[in-house]
Amino acid sequence: MNIAIIGASGAIGKALVHQLCLNKWTEVIYAFSRSQKVYEHFNVKSFFINLEDENSIKTAANNAICFNGFDLIIIATGILHTDEIFPEKALRDISAKNFHKLFAINTIGPALVMKYFLPLLAKNRKSIFAVMSARIGSINDNRLGGWYAYRASKAALNMIIKTASIELRRQNKHAIIIGLHPGTVDSPLSKPFQTPISREKIFTAEYAAIKLLDVMNKLTLESTGKIFAWDGVEIPY
């Protein structure tokens, strides 16, 4: 398999690289991140990417061209909070600056990656393009409210996945594009919000990667355009 992972230096991205390196069918992994991490695995090639810069994404795609196309492309990026950004509890907390930042990373960046990387999927066999989404982006599943910018950025991402799947079906009949919810992973992204969650519902990045790869292994062409949780259960829009 020829594989590309965007966001390879994050908790889930690193775990996916590790797990895929253990797969005997893996030929080469193109690992993209802002840190351009150096890997010990001989079949991992490291490249720079900045999801807030379209030229960077275009250059990354040009560097990723491989013979016979990609079997698997995963976007493992995402942002929930920073030192200056925190999920909103109420409408009074909404900030245009925060909305712009979360949409730039969670929605616009992945959309631009699709623009340049979807054409790189293999066309003569089953191929998968997977994007890290989140259950919290489900409109039908929203029971608690709050977290306006993050919810909206992930809901918009889900719509982009669905819309891209319709276009992709016309261009590449063997390709599947989906969103994935990894669950609550023990990482810097979830750390400030783990207190009310029972420990058995907080996953290690390695466990999440194993479960997500298992979900992807079971996908069919009918799966395209859908959002799946780590346990394989479809999440409503």
Image (cartoon, rainbow, N blue to C red):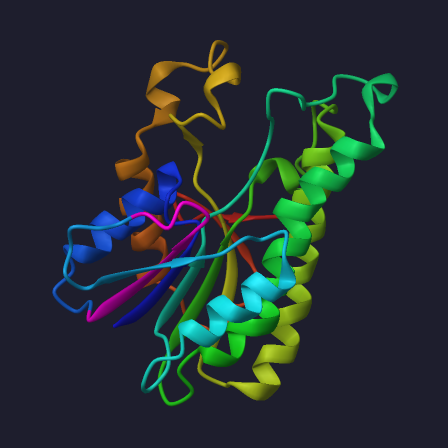
Magenta segment: 27-37
* Rendered location of residue 176, percent (x, y): 48, 71
Q: Is residue 45 magenta?
A: no
Q: Quadrant of residue 6?
A: bottom left
* Relative vertical location of residue 123 with respect to residue 155 in this rendering, above or below: below
Quarter of the picture holding the N terminus: bottom left
Residue farthest to the bottom, as pictured: 124
Is residue 140 rendered to the left or right of residue 203?
Answer: right
Q: Quadrant of residue 45?
A: bottom left
* Rendered location of residue 195, percent (x, y): 47, 9
Q: Quadrant of residue 66?
A: bottom left
Is residue 233 rendered to the left or right of residue 104?
Answer: left
Is residue 209 rendered to the left or right of residue 149?
Answer: left
* Rendered location of residue 39, percent (x, y): 22, 50
Q: Is residue 34 magenta?
A: yes
Residue farthest to the right, as pictured: 92
* Rendered location of residue 70, percent (x, y): 37, 75
* Relative vertical location of residue 68 with respect to residue 21 in this rendering, above or below: below
**Do we see residue 173 in this rendering?**
yes
Viewer-closest of 196 and 119: 119
Residue farthest to the top, as pictured: 195
Viewer-closest of 231 and 74: 74
Residue shown at the point (31%, 54%) measured from the top left: 213
Residue shown at the point (68%, 23%) measured from the top left: 87
Viewer-closest of 101 and 175: 101
**Do we see residue 140 in this rendering?**
no
Viewer-closest of 237 and 124: 124
